[in-house]
Image: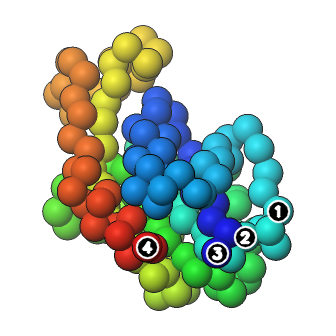
Amino acid sequence: MKTIIAYTTRHGATQQVAERINDILGGKAEVFDLQNNRINLKDYDRIIIGASIHGGKIQGRMRRFLRRNKKKLLKKELGLFLCSIQTGDISVKQFNKNFPKSLRNQAKATALVGGAFYMDKMSNMEKSIVKKVAEIDKTVDNINYEEVERFAQKFL
């Protein structure tokens, strides 16, 4: 089965998760950043999609990709994961708000994998917002690699 792990990321956490999933799958998937590239979905049987939350939303590029390709995605084996520093009900609401119900229902696996704030990769404005809103002033990495493993195992 030809697999692609397509993601968008602002500071790298979602890319790290995508690469870890690929490692678990034996390095056989193509890991693909949607921010800079376009995909021909016809080339893939399985599509794993990863996004991160910023201000309650996934990146615009990912939102447009999902909207434009929804019909094609519904015909593929699909996985969805979300990187968010939030946990519990908040992260569930973020996931449900940002991934269409039809895709969530089609997905073979879904996961909330935690998130990270990498202060050294943020602009001064982003740091200021994170400090004010999240009350965090240093790098925090709360990626749940056990959840990443659980998610990836469903595709072996």
Position of the N terminus by quadrant: bottom right
Dot 2 amino acid type: Tyr
Q: Is residue 86 visible?
A: no
Rendered location of residue 59, percent (x, y): 56, 47
Which is nearer the N-term, disc 4 or disc 3?
A: 3
Query: Which of the two discs, 1 and 4, sits closer to the camera?
Result: 4
Q: Which mark is residue 40?
A: 1
Residue occupied by mark 4: 156
First in sequence: mark 3 vs mark 1: 3
Callout 3: SS? loop
What is the secondary structure assignment of the residue under circle 1?
loop
Give the amino acid type for the residue marked by disc 4 in the picture.
Answer: Leu
> Which residue is found at the position 28% from the left and 67% from the top?
150
Name the element at disc 2. Answer: loop
Of residues 125 and 71, which is closer to you in this image?
A: 71
CA gap, disc 4 and disc 3: 10 Å
Numbered disc in front, either 1 or 2: 2
Q: Position of residue 26 (x, y in %)?
A: 48, 56
Q: Quadrant of residue 69?
A: bottom right
Q: Secondary structure at mark 4?
A: loop
Q: Residue at x 32, y 49 (%)?
A: 84
